[in-house]
Image (cartoon, helix red, strand yellow):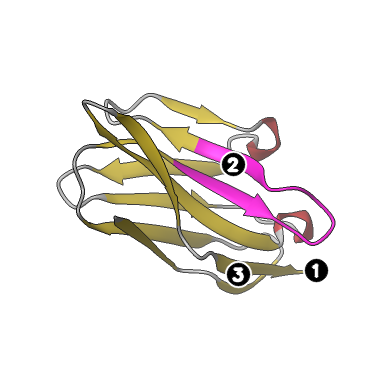
Amino acid sequence: QVQLVESGGGLVQAGGSLRLSCVASGSIVNLGTMSWYRQTPEKLRELVATITNDMKINYADFVKARFTISRDNAKNMVDLQMNNLNPEDTAVYYCAAQDCSQYGCLPYWGKGTQVTVSS
């Protein structure tokens, strides 16, 4: 089992910044792609950004160069730097990771961290 714990959420004014962090622990074999998702009560969970273990990155279109995903493989960590936040970014942000072995990859999720952007 792999546990993912997010931190760094909070309340920020529009135009502000937050940095989310996620640490993986437990019986890790080989962490593959790590991702950030977000969800609001009105929307399905949506992908924000992904980063592979060889640092290939993809962002959702709505990020628009405002967010930066990074990871530290030695620390089993993935971060999401969010700049120029707007109220539409208000959501619960979830960390996700794949743990891979010779038998395939299993997905894991954190419990989420709330991000609230006030106008």
- Please determine whether, in this image, residue 69 is positioned above or below residue 89: above
Q: Residue 48 magenta-drawn?
A: yes
- As drawn, the label of residue 114 is 3
Magenta: predominant secondary structure element? Answer: strand
Quadrant (top left/top right/bottom left/bottom right) for the N terminus: bottom left
Separation of marks 1 and 3 at Cα, in angstroms:
16 Å
Q: Name the one closer to the observer, 56 or 68.
A: 56
Q: Residue at x 52, y 62 (%)?
A: 18
In the shown orientation, is residue 27 left or right of residue 41? left
Magenta extent: 35-49
Measured as percent of width and height from the top left, residue 104 is found at 32, 28
User: Amino acid under label 2?
Assistant: Val
Query: Dot 2: what SS?
Result: strand
In the shown orientation, is residue 85 left or right of residue 112? right
Separation of marks 1 and 2 at Cα, in angstroms:
21 Å
Query: Dot 3: what SS?
Result: strand
In the shown orientation, is residue 101 left or right of residue 104? left
